[in-house]
Image: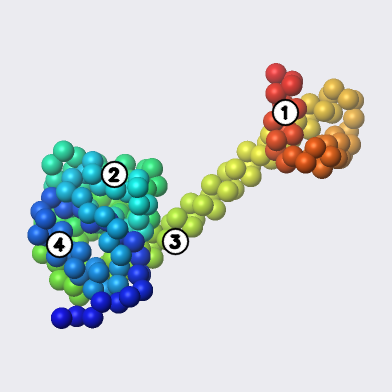
Amino acid sequence: MRRVLLLSKGRIIVVDDESLVRMDFVEMLEEAGFEVVAQAADGIAAIEACKKHLPDVVLLDIEMPLLDGISAGKKISQDGLAGCVVFLTAYSSEKHLKKASEIGACGYLVKPLDEKSFIPTVKIAMSKGKTLMSLQKRIDKLETDLQNRKLIERAKGILMKKSSIDEEAAYSMMRTLSMQRRISMKELAEMIVLSDD
């Protein structure tokens, strides 16, 4: 029997409608040190499990009842419910591969699998997923910063017009009010814009 590592290398959800196949994947993953946080037999259950656990990787079979793996993977990716999606399928058709690629899958493995190809693919997919999540967080922050900046500029313009002051004086007024009221510049800007509507 192979030695089970005690430190988890990542949190994984395994989704396959065949319980014996799921058990085999779970065994390989746990022996490699991964933590399998949930299992599911269909796409709907996969989405619910991902909402609950927010795994690093979700391993999805493509052909499943109720909701297929491609549709579930699309929902999971769009909603950011997992670090990455890896498809495990007995079907290596171009149609499936194209759909998997379109939703941003980090891996596509054709069953039956052996541990030598399965575990390295999961590790690489997890790494790619973490990189993508990090980039998405940076993009989200930049978008938020830009929206806040636009809001502050709008509020500054309102103050300039109402008080007949220049840009520097309007900004200085906002900074002073922000510190006195102990609120962020964004919150202050929202109130100024609201009062002008």
**Residue depicted at 45% across the width and 55% down the height:** 133
Q: Distance from label 1 to label 4 (Cα)?
A: 56 Å
Residue 53 at x, y percent in the picture: 35, 52
Which residue position holds label 4? 23
Which residue position holds label 1? 191
> Foreground mark, 3 or 2?
2
Crowding at dot 2, Cα within 10 Å, few <14 / some 14-19 / many 20+, comes out as many
Which residue position holds label 2? 47
Circle 1 SS class: helix
Residue in the foreground of this view, choosing between 82 and 8: 8
Crowding at dot 1, Cα within 10 Å, few <14 / some 14-19 / many 20+, comes out as few
Q: Distance from label 3 to label 2 (Cα)?
A: 22 Å
Residue in the foreground of this view, choosing between 11 and 98: 11
> Foreground mark, 4 or 2?
4
Task: Say what amino acid the circle numbered 2 marks.
Answer: Ile
Residue 178 at x, y percent in the picture: 79, 39
State which tag comes first along the sequence, 1 or 2.
2
**Residue depicted at 14% across the width and 45% down the height:** 64
Above or below residue 22? Residue 68 is above
Task: Say what amino acid the circle numbered 3 marks.
Answer: Thr
